[in-house]
Amino acid sequence: MNGCILIIQRSSSTFLLALSVAILFCTGGCGESLYKDLRPVTYRLKWLINTSVAGGLYADAHGIFADHGLRVTIKEGGPERDSIKELELGHAQFGVASADQVIRAVSKGAPVVVIAQLFQVNPLQWIYRPEKTCIDTVQDLKGKTIGVTYGGNDETIMRALLTKWKIKNKDVKLFSVRYDYTPFYDGEVDLWPVYQNAEGMVIGEKLRKAGERAGFFNPDDFGARFVANSVITTERMLKERSDIVHKFTKALLQGWREALNPANCGKAVKTICRFDKDTPVHIIRKQLQATRILMKPSPEVEIGRIDTKAWIETERIMLEQKLIARRISVKRILRHYAQIASR
């Protein structure tokens, strides 16, 4: 293997911590000249670093990006970080966003295109305590305090769900979610948005240790089917640096394929643990297994495949619920790089 330069920038609600780690895997002569020859690009994530971004971490830590001539800076996301805006401003060349975020931005003129779809099944759900909160139907949401990330896809999905089932704003209380889960643990919030394969397992484990059960409210079960995390870039990048787009996509998807390969489980877990030091190793293993199912639900599905029908359905729901003012003809922003990258 050649070398790799791993740069991860971590952020929180109170500070930005820039962490630069250089990891060199050498079988022959390599060093400073390798670093200089790599093309620098920035990849802005949608949320904090956890198992849901294992493919990018793996591609960096095991030299896949470097083998494709790239030096990738991976930046954490979060409520205060907008990957689409950063792409527009030129602060990042690639990012992660959910379909509703992309569709809303494009409807307002953002020159964004989709080059890969990470999750084939949306992992977004709301965790709750069944002993304290009974949720059998959407109508059971009335009177509840529901956590949402304002401006995030969970807010969009919840509002679409409430509108679809004719639940008025006054019938629920929306609570602004940040990084701290304390309001949920303390019972201030009844339902908390999580990715079921990541935070959902962490919170569920803590509830079980406290002698409580965890329940999950899945919006897909009630007609709110949205496409989750996808990899995006700009029309300008495609036009002016198509070679970089191809190399990045190919390397990223290779990283995901290798990270999700059961034979590489140990290596993948160690890679994630370098940056997610708070999650126990046994939980990360479970998260990785759950992520594999969400990204590759059947053997014939390629990692990164764009589900065009699901994107069309997401746009239809958003238009129907007046979340966008006009149809954007979503097919025009989808670039099916996964088929190319797998060759």
Image (cartoon, rainbow, N blue to C red):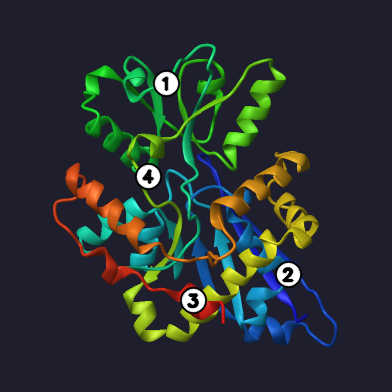
Q: Are marks 2 and 3 in contact (CB under 8 Å)?
A: no
- Name above or below for residue 317 compared with residue 139: below
Ranked by sequence position, the earlier of labels 3 and 1 is: 1
Seen at 59% across and 51% down, the residue is 293
- Between 304 and 202, which is closer to the camera in this rendering? 304
Q: Amino acid at mark 1?
A: Asp
| Residue 181 spot, x, y in % from top left | 55, 28
Ranked by sequence position, the earlier of labels 1 and 2 is: 2
Total number of numbered discs in the rendering = 4
Seen at 34% across and 69% down, the residue is 334
Q: Amino acid at mark 4?
A: Asn
Q: Amino acid at mark 2?
A: His
User: Within 10 Å of the Cα at label 1, are there few (<14), some (14-19), or many (20+) other Cα atoms?
Assistant: few
Mark 4 and mark 2: Cα distance apart in space = 31 Å
Camera sees residue 17? no
Ranked by sequence position, the earlier of labels 2 and 3 is: 2
* Label 4 sits on residue: 153
- Quarter the N terminus occupies: bottom right
Q: Secondary structure at mark 4?
A: helix
Closer to the camera: disc 2 or disc 3?
A: 3
